[in-house]
Structure formats: structure tokens, C-alpha cells
Image: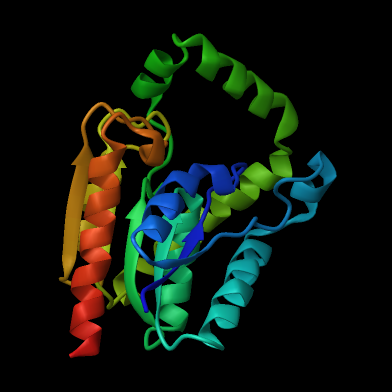
Amino acid sequence: MKVCLLIHGFTGGEYEVSPLAEYLEAQGYTVKMFTLQGHGGSKADLRSATRHDWIQGAEIELKQLLTTYSKVHLIGFSTGALIAAHLVVKYPDQIGSLTMLAAPVFPLNPQQIVRTLAEWPMVRAYIRNFFVVPSRATREFYRMVRDTFAIYPQIQLPTLIVQGDRDHLVKMKSTSYLTEHLGTRDTEVMIVPTSGHLVCYAERKRDVFEAVRGWIDRHHLIMSE
């Protein structure tokens, strides 16, 4: 049984990874998603949640799966990828593989942000976030980014790294940093053409989904041998 835990990003929700979840479920995978603490509620809820709460919430979901299954494959999007990295280090024997989608190792790409803001739907999204996201929550995000630098060298599990080549929130050098600093040498990189940050909604999202499936299938087979 191939089991996956999907973790969404900062200020986002399950919708960020739901297209991938639906694809994997259609392939016969067991898939679990959840909402990070402070997300999906009020501004006060987000303000009161810390990066430790986000990790702890994901850990609770992982441990629940592990009561039934011996191995779980972790898939994290954006900040969810950083959260997944922390869990991989803490539960190396219970996790089969790690997939990092648009991991914000180096967040914010100013040139891409300028291009993104030329698109009105994204302008509305940025304006909304400006007024809705509490500054305390934003500080917790950057602390999570900072804390995770100490985690990367400790990751010894197979890791798939996926990033869009037009990501407006993550610098492209994030991908090269991961390949150079992860503790594992079993890595694979996929750069998604014409994709922004939301790689699960990219024009070539099917390619992303098939790459994730292939990565998990390959390492699930190794686990079974």
C-alpha cells in the first residue's frame, strides 16, 4: 500500500495540493491532507499559530497514519516542504521518500514578483494577503525558513525537488542549494516550464503528477525488496 501525506503552504490550504492528491488517489494511493494550525480560520487564528504548531500538527497527522501503515511518503508544497523536511529527520525509518514542491529555501524573487503583479488576479491576491496576513505570522514563516537550513544536511532519504521556472515567490537558486546541501545523494530535480509557484496548477501539471508518482513508485519498490 502506497500512502502519502500532503502538506500545504503558508497562508494556503488543501486546495494547493488537492489536484495532485486526486491524481494519486485515482492511481490507487492512500492520500491524506489536512489544514495547518491557524489556517482556514480567522486572522486571529493565524496570528496565534507558530511554526512549531505547524510542525506539530503535521507530526500528529503523520503519527496517525503510522498507527495503520508502516511507511508514509511525504509531499510538501512551499512551507509544507520545509515542514516535511523536519519530519523526515525525526522519523527517518517511517518515511519512504520526500517530495519538495516549490520549497522556499530562498523566498521571494523580486523580478518575478514584478512580472506576476502585472496579472490582475495575482494583484488581488497580493493585496488581500497584505491586509489579511498578520505580521507575526509572516515572521514565523521566515523563522521557519531560517530554522530549516540546519535540517537540510540531516536529510538522508530520497528527495524529489520540483520548482516552476517562473516561480514568483521562490528564487531558482533554492533548487541548486537543496541538491548541494541535502544529506542524501539520492535526489532528482524537475523544473516545470512556464510554471509559477502553484506547480500543482501548472500548464504541465500532469508531468509533475507523473514525476511524483514515478518517484514514489520507484522508492516504494525499493522498500519492498
Front in this rendered view, residue 109 or 74:
74
Q: Quadrant of residue 108?
A: top left
- Pick the quarter of the image with the N terminus: bottom left
Q: Is residue 132 visible?
A: yes
Q: Position of residue 22 (x, y in %)?
A: 44, 51
Q: Quadrant of residue 207?
A: top left
In the image, residue 151 sits, relative to residue 18, either above or below, namely below
Say how the picture is coloured: rainbow
Q: Position of residue 75 (x, y in %)?
A: 41, 61
Front in this rendered view, residue 36 or 140:
36
Front in this rendered view, residue 213 or 123:
213
Is residue 101 left or right of 21 when viewed as pictured? left
Q: Is residue 181 visible?
A: no
- Pick the quarter of the image with the C terminus: bottom left
Q: Where is residue 59 in the image (x, y as percent from the top left)?
A: 58, 74
Q: Count all numbered tags in the image, as a single digit.
A: 0
In the image, residue 36 sits, relative to residue 133, either above or below, namely below
Q: Which residue: 42% across, 59% down?
A: 25
In the image, residue 104 sits, relative to residue 195, either above or below, namely below
Q: Where is residue 135 in the image (x, y as percent from the top left)?
A: 71, 39
Q: Which residue: 36% across, 50% down?
A: 101
Q: Which residue: 18% across, 71% down?
A: 218
Q: Which residue: 26% across, 77% down?
A: 220
Q: In which quarter of the image is residue 3?
A: bottom left
Is residue 191 left or right of 121 when viewed as pictured? left
Is residue 18 left or right of 170 when viewed as pictured? right
Is residue 50 left or right of 194 when viewed as pictured? right
